[in-house]
Image: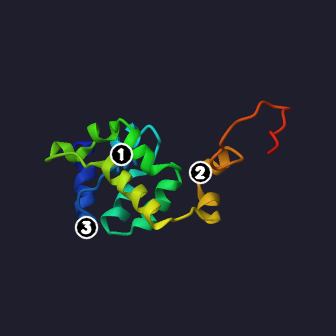
């Protein structure tokens, strides 16, 4: 006589379906380690892919969604993203800060200006009124006259 577990298995084979699983794999979409380590919170993979393909203006627009000063940030940032880069386990980490600096320098050289669509599409637009505020005023105060 077969045990219950064996009877279930025999029944599945007899039905022509073969062995069946009761659980499916659970896929989790994790944030890449370099994005998690970035102090500016940039989507590094997105603009790095554009830069790899030679689409410098697309890369620049992608960076502007999170960081209004890519050339400055590429120079001043202490780049913790590179120490968390997965590529470092294979050979060497990607020079993310150098590529970001290059994208910013190309934008300055070509004199690209951010468009209104870039401004509207950014995530930071939902958080504050101005895309790049130059100064913050206390509530109730007025702006200085020129």
Local packing at callout 1 (Cα closer than 10 Å; few below 14, some 14-19, many 20+) is: some
Marks 1 and 2, how far apart at CA: 19 Å
Is residue 111 or residue 83 the one in the foreground?
111
Indicate the position of residue 83 as horizontal and vertical percent values: 27, 37
Marks 1 and 3, how far apart at CA: 42 Å
Marks 3 and 2, how far apart at CA: 52 Å
* Residue position marked by numbered label 3 in the rendering: 16
Query: Is there any visible trace of residue 12 in the rendered image?
Result: yes
Q: Residue placed at 33% from the left, 36% from the top?
A: 80
Circle 3 SS class: loop
Q: With respect to residue 106, does 135 lie above or below?
A: above
Query: Counting residues from the N terminus, which is met first, the one under dot 1 or under dot 2?
Result: 1
User: Picture quarter containing residue 103?
Assistant: bottom left
Circle 1 SS class: loop
In this picture, residue 34 sits left or right of residue 123: left
In this picture, residue 27 sits left or right of residue 7: right
Q: Residue placed at 50% from the left, 65% from the top?
A: 111
Q: Residue placed at 43% from the left, 56% from the top?
A: 104
* Residue position marked by numbered label 2 in the rendering: 123
Please identify, in this view, whether the residue under mark 1 or under mark 2 is nearer the observer.
2
Please identify, in this view, whether the residue under mark 3 or under mark 2 is nearer the observer.
2
Indicate the position of residue 145 as horizontal and vertical percent values: 82, 43
Q: Residue placed at 13% from the left, 47% from the top?
A: 91
User: Picture quarter containing residue 35?
Assistant: top left
Q: Which mark is residue 32?
A: 1
Query: Counting residues from the N terminus, which is met first, the one under dot 1 or under dot 3?
Result: 3
Query: Is there any visible trace of residue 46 in the rendered image?
Result: no
In this picture, residue 64 sits left or right of residue 33: right
Query: Counting residues from the N terminus, which is met first, the one under dot 3 or under dot 2?
Result: 3
Q: With respect to residue 4, does 46 lie above or below?
A: below
Circle 2 SS class: loop
Is residue 143 or residue 122 the one in the foreground?
143
């Amino acid at each position: 006589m077969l045990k219950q577990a064996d009877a279930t298995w025999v029944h599945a084979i007899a039905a022509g379906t073969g062995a069946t699983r009761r659980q499916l794999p659970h896929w989790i979409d994790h944030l890449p380690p370099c994005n998690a380590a970035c102090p500016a919170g940039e989507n590094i993979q997105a603009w790095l892919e554009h830069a790899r393909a030679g689409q410098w203006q697309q890369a620049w627009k992608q960076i502007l969604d999170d960081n209004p000063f890519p050339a400055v940030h590429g120079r001043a940032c202490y780049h913790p993203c590179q120490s968390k880069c997965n590529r470092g386990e294979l050979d060497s980490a990607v020079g993310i800060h150098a590529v970001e600096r290059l994208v910013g320098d190309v934008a300055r050289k070509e004199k690209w200006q951010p468009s209104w669509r870039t401004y509207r599409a950014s995530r930071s637009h939902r958080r504050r009124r101005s895309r790049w505020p130059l100064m913050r005023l206390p509530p109730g105060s007025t702006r200085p006259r020129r």
